Amino acid sequence: MNKKILIIDYGIGNLRSVYQAVTHLGYECELSNKKKDIENAYKIILPGVGAFGAAISKLKNLDLIHSIEKFKNKGNYLLGVCLGMQLMLKKSFEFGQNDGLNFVDGQVVNLNTIVKSEAEIPHIGWCKLENIKDSKNKIFKNIENEDMFYFIHSYYSKIIQKNDIEILYSIYNDSKFTSMFINENIIGVQFHPEKSGASGLKLLYNFLQL
Amino acid sequence: MVKIRIIPCLDVKDGRVVKGINFLNLIDAGDPVEQAKHYSDNGADEICFLDISASLENRDTIINVVKKTANEVFIPLTVGGGISSIENIQALLKAGADKVSINSAAIKNPNIIKEASEYFGNQCIVVAVDAKKHNDDWFVYSHGGTKKTDLLALNWIEKAQELGAGEILLTSMDKDGTKSGFDNELLGKVSEFIKIPVIASGGVGTLDHFYDGVVKGKADALLAASVFHFNEISIKEVKEYLKDKNISIRN
């Protein structure tokens, strides 16, 4: 089987960093926005920065949504990074309402709904995954409680239906928010593993090894 | 708690680092990629490049520097200096920068902040402000601190926030190069006044100054150049010092 990693290139965000990190870890990867490539991929990373509405429109315009669903239903691993994670939820409230890929029952909501009013938004900085020690998932191999990851976001993923979904959380200004979810083969990370130094590379490597 | 970020800033001219010294193990102190990697390996939370190339042609060299850095350094990279258009920003982000900092171009045409933040997301648009005190007010300077404007720093920063800036990189021209500490009066005023993170810059000379920047200046991130480049203080020392004083940092 072709074990290339596919990064969905839908014309949004800085794909180069993700690409470089995967290559640095010794894996071959390719950027693509072709339906056939996505449906037949071995493993996919869905990156993204910017606004939810614009991103989901681009996926729609490229007619990729059905292909991503098809890929997901095969049980292969899909990693959503930052906005890529948020896109996997049911809906978003960033600049109006938009429907997402609906792989996980949840909503993308502003951090200002949970943090204290004096907290700065966007949240930019490094956080631990607070409950990482409770997880036995292989994606956390060699990752310690003290490992930190780089976040830069104004919205977060509020998971509604939590059954069977593993949720990791981080703390910003005393408030808990979802920093990662694992729903079988669907994994979302709010942080940027490709920008989180050695800790991020470890996690990305573990994903590539799954 | 928010983890205070420590950001070394490298001045890059025509693709080479100026005022860098030779750290142990570095083959070429003038190579920005090697310098960035050194800082990343030693605990920097982000890296900042300030392009001070004089001519337009030489500015293109920064694109290559960013590309090479992104191949080897896996922490956030901010690039500033001479950015004047959406095309400039796009080229830098595409090359691997995570954020760009805009200064004079935003003063000349504030709308670039709005356009850029709508297009690329406000998380990657840093507005850099050089401020100097005249009597009781701080005024904004443009063109690398050479031209005084009529803008009051607080007003301008508030406007930048409204237009979509994701962060403010605030340099005190009174303090820059003095090693007498950050301008905590200015920083404190700005940090209280706005909702987006503030990066303190200019004046740091001792470990205490970093601490004061957080406690008195209420900065979210601390940027320094010469103390790191001349190996007077290491990033590790800063972090240990802050941690001992109960400031939350990334280990």
Image: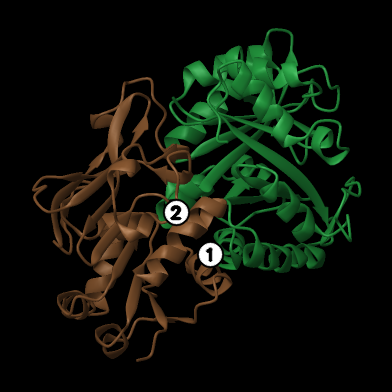
CB atoms of marks 2 and 1 within 8 Å: yes
- Where is residue B214 drawn, in percent x and y? 60, 19
- Disc on res. B210: none
Amino acid type of the residue tagged 1 in the rendering: Ser
- Where is residue A64 drawn, in percent x and y? 24, 78
- Asked if both marks, 2 and 1, belong to the same chain, the answer given is yes
The local crowd at label 1, few if under 14, some if 14 to 19, many if 20 or more residues have their Cα within 10 Å, is many
- Disc on res. A17: 1
Query: In front: B245, or B59?
Result: B245
Any idea which chain is the green one in this picture?
Answer: B
Rendered residue at 81%/65% (across/down): B58
- Report which quarter residue A192 is drawn in: bottom left
Amino acid type of the residue tagged 2 in the rendering: His
Chain for disc number 1 = A
Is B158 situated above or below A198?
Answer: above
Chain for disc number 2 = A
Q: How many marks?
A: 2
Q: Quadrant of the C terminus of chain A?
A: bottom left
- Disc on res. A192: 2
Query: In front: A189, or B205?
Result: A189
Q: Quadrant of the N terminus of chain A?
A: bottom left
Label 1 element class: helix
Asked whether residue B116 appears in the rendered view, the answer is yes
- Relative to B47, is A190 on the left or the right? left
- Where is residue B16 drawn, in percent x and y? 85, 59
- Report which quarter residue B242 is drawn in: top right
The local crowd at label 2, few if under 14, some if 14 to 19, many if 20 or more residues have their Cα within 10 Å, is many
